[in-house]
Image (cartoon, grey):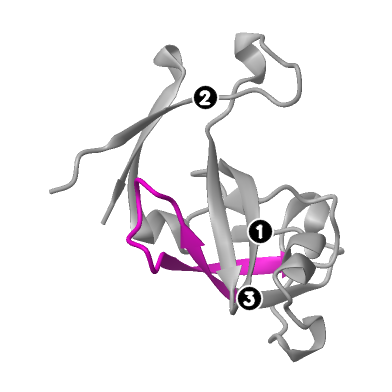
Amino acid sequence: MPQPLRIPYSGVGNATQAISLMPRLSMRLFLGNQYADVTGLVDSGASVNVLPYTVGLTLGADWNSQPQLASLGGNLSVTEVRALAVMAYHPELTDDMGTELLFAWTRTDNAPLIFGQINFFLQFDLCFFRSEQVFEITPR
């Protein structure tokens, strides 16, 4: 069984106060021969992975050719959403081919990139240690 990768929580911008620290993970997303280096919030409370609009465009995805999904909840409930499957690569978590992640691709950039229950948490096992300001992630 692979050893878990221990990753420190990180702040946004110049934020260094403990209250602003969150579990964030950097990955490279691929679609065909296009890629985008992203950092997303690892969110056990999110039902789905969420991808901001311009990240999908950077990957070369065609909005109109992706299947439409039911709307998301909360502040994204008024935003149109499409399904988008991409490959995700991390040098310590995936093989060279990466792993397939399914995203709710939003038609807004006001949504953060989120790694959620479907299907990030089905591809990786996670443990959060908030008091230590780290999380552990292990590929399944």
Graded by Cα atoms within 10 Å as few (under 14), some (14 to 19) or many (20 or more), the crowding at tag 2 reads many
Q: Magenta span has 76?
A: no
Residue 47 visible (yes or no): no
Q: Amino acid at mark 1?
A: Ala
Instruction: Kindly give the residue lying farthest to the left in the view shown.
Output: 1
Which quadrant of the figure contains the C terminus?
bottom left
Determine which of the numbered discs, if any, sits on residue 84 in the image.
3
As rendered, which of 84 and 128 lies closer to the eye? 84
Residue 38, position as x, y percentages in the image: 64, 49
As rendered, which of 92 and 114 lies closer to the eye? 92
Q: Secondary structure at mark 3?
A: strand
Q: Amino acid at mark 2?
A: Tyr
In the image: residue 124, left or right of residue 39: left
From the image, tell me which residue sits under label 1: 36
Q: Kindly report the distance in space between the C-alpha atoms of the residues bearing marks 2 and 3.
A: 27 Å
Above or below, comparing residue 57 to residue 7 in the picture: below
In the image: residue 27, left or right of residue 37: left
Above or below, comparing residue 4 to residue 82 in the picture: above
From the image, tell me which residue sits under label 2: 9
As rendered, which of 69 and 140 lies closer to the eye? 140
Q: Which residues are magenta?
A: 85-105
Q: Which mark is first along the chain, 1 or 3?
A: 1
